[in-house]
Image (tube, coloured by chain):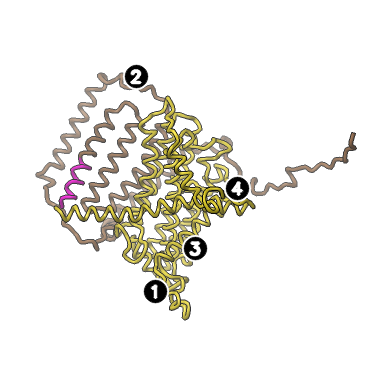
Chain colours: A brown, B yellow
Amino acid sequence: MLVQNIVFYATAALLVFSGFMMIISRNPVRSALFLVLAFVASSVLWILLEAEFLGLVLVFVYVGAVMTLFLFVIMMLYLDWQHIRGGFVKYLPLGGLIVAAMVGLMIFIISPNHFGLLLPVEHGADYSNIKELGEVLYTQYAYPFELAAVLLLVAIISAISLSHQGKTKNKTQDVSKQVQANPDERVRLVKMPVEKKQ
Amino acid sequence: MWNDVLALIWIVIKILIIVLPLMGAVAYLTLAERKIIGYMQCRIGPNRVGIRGIGQPLADGLKLFLKEIIVPSKANAYLFILAPVLTIAPALAAWAVIPFNQDWVLSNINAGLLYALAMTSLGVYGILMAGWASNSKYAFLGALRSAAQIISYEIAMGFALVGVLIAANSANLQDIVLRQSGGFFHWFWLPLLPLFVVYWIAGLAETNRHPFDLAEGESEIVAGFHVEYSGITFAVFFLAEYANMIFISALASIMFLGGWLSPFEGVPLLGSLFAWVPGIVWFVTKIAFFLFLYIWIRATLPRYRYDQVMRLGWKILIPVTIVWIVVASLAVELHVGPWFNY
């Protein structure tokens, strides 16, 4: 129990620290990397709660794929870091309003009255929460699950249709043409008469 | 209190028992690679340090250790130094779930396969950070190539692992091995052959090895993401790459070639003849086979062009895995023997 407590307080502190640093660091790449650290720390917390499936999915979906693409884009942007906080005062009222709304919502929804501080039931090592999750997801929540899948599919198709520019503008290689290429058409062997030694 | 401390010390000892031989294996894998490629190209490879070049990895290690670490003047120094550390850490952490024999495993967790996938997906950060922090165009291009390639092939690899998950009905690596018991033809390589091939190709791409080593592409971008690195920082990237190669090989032998199980199980005479061989010998032999395959492929195939790499990953490997997941699910549902008749 002692080790678990140490791990919990250490990662919780790390989570708060990295979330804070994500907001205050000037360089967007460093912000993104702190966000990655925050994701990893929260996945550790989930694993401590015996939600190992969700914890690992958080690592390989958000950290492994989503944040990599984020970094990809941020790293390629040229940003003038010195002048990026110019509009701080201008946006302060709106930002304050949003913060107040979110804090109010959080207090309303997950305050101790509603959420409770009940410890989750501890299970033995044999307990597999992947199986439990799968059973609930594919029986009780089958329709919402399928709906979410369809929603993602729609998003994929619309993303492709937005970025697809038609055949004329497309500069990709024609694979069948490349496969059919043979040396007879492309290489011309020229026969030269042997030159005499001078 | 003291029990906790003792347990922690015991875990550290177990970690050392895994990591130290792994580092030795990495060192001698570099020698094996140079020797094997040398023989394939009618050379003899390194042969000056020690008997027939046996001391070469130690000499290389010492040389890299003593060299100066140069941080480029406009580089982001923190991230520049952190990047190799972030590359090697997941490469070593992934070994926590690998079972070397029955019950010889550091952490026998139920979601072992997911853990392995999560750790391999973390390796890309070291590469991206190295490329960005170097503040060099070549390094950055190499990092972008590498990241795009790893993300693309991770999908195919994940789907291949889903097929194994369906066939084994478990994500625990030890259960996956035990499900394959019964001899050579009971292993998953046969019912999941397309997934096995896809996993192997994706494994080559994930580790940035030939023929998918565009991240380094000497002829185009010098050395890719680690072009600015020297001395021990370069050596750490090297260690991570080879540790990842060994890890992908270990995972392949666990999922498709029955891990520590003997190939002669169930064969009348050979089975009893080889019954005394400890499981870890078979496991190491299988890993060695895959590592040889890595080197053999490197010596044989030319490098892919970048658009060909992307096409192979997205348009060929992913559809193949999706089709075969359906086939595998049907086979499990219909209890096709001898693999799924439980």
Which disc, if any, is residue B193? 3
Q: CA distance from mark 3 to mark 4?
A: 25 Å
> Mark 2 vs mark 3: same chain?
no
Mark 4 burial class by Cα count in 10 Å: few <14, some 14-19, many 20+? few
All told, the count of numbered labels is 4
- Callout 3: 10 Å neighbours few (<14), some, many (20+)? few
Is B179 part of what is drawn in magenta? no
Choose mark 3 or mark 4, whichever is in front.
4
* Contact, mark 1 vs mark 2 (Cβ under 8 Å): no
Q: Report whether A145 appears left or right of A116.
A: right
The span from disc 3 to disc 1 (Cα, nearest Å) is 18 Å
**Disc 2 target residue:** A83
- Between marks 3 and 1 in the image, the one whose residue lies nearer the viewer: 3
The type of residue carrying mark 1 is: Asn
Q: What percent of the width, then of the height, locates residue B20?
A: 37, 52
Which amino acid, mark 4?
Pro
| Residue on which the image places disc 4 | B302
Q: Callout 1: few (<14), some (14-19), or many (20+) C-alpha neighbours within 10 Å? A: few
- Crowd around label 2: few <14 · some 14–19 · many ≥20 (10 Å): few
- Magenta region, residue range: A1-12
Q: Is B319 placed above or below A37 here?
A: below
Q: Is residue B4 above or below residue B236?
A: below
At mark 2, the secondary structure is helix
Query: In the orientation shown, which residue stands out farthest toward the bottom?
Result: B268
In the rendering, at what x and y percent does residue B144 appear? 46, 37
Residue drawn at 18 percent across, 46 percent down: A6
Q: Which residue is at the far front?
A: B50
Tell me the residue that label 1 is attached to: B341
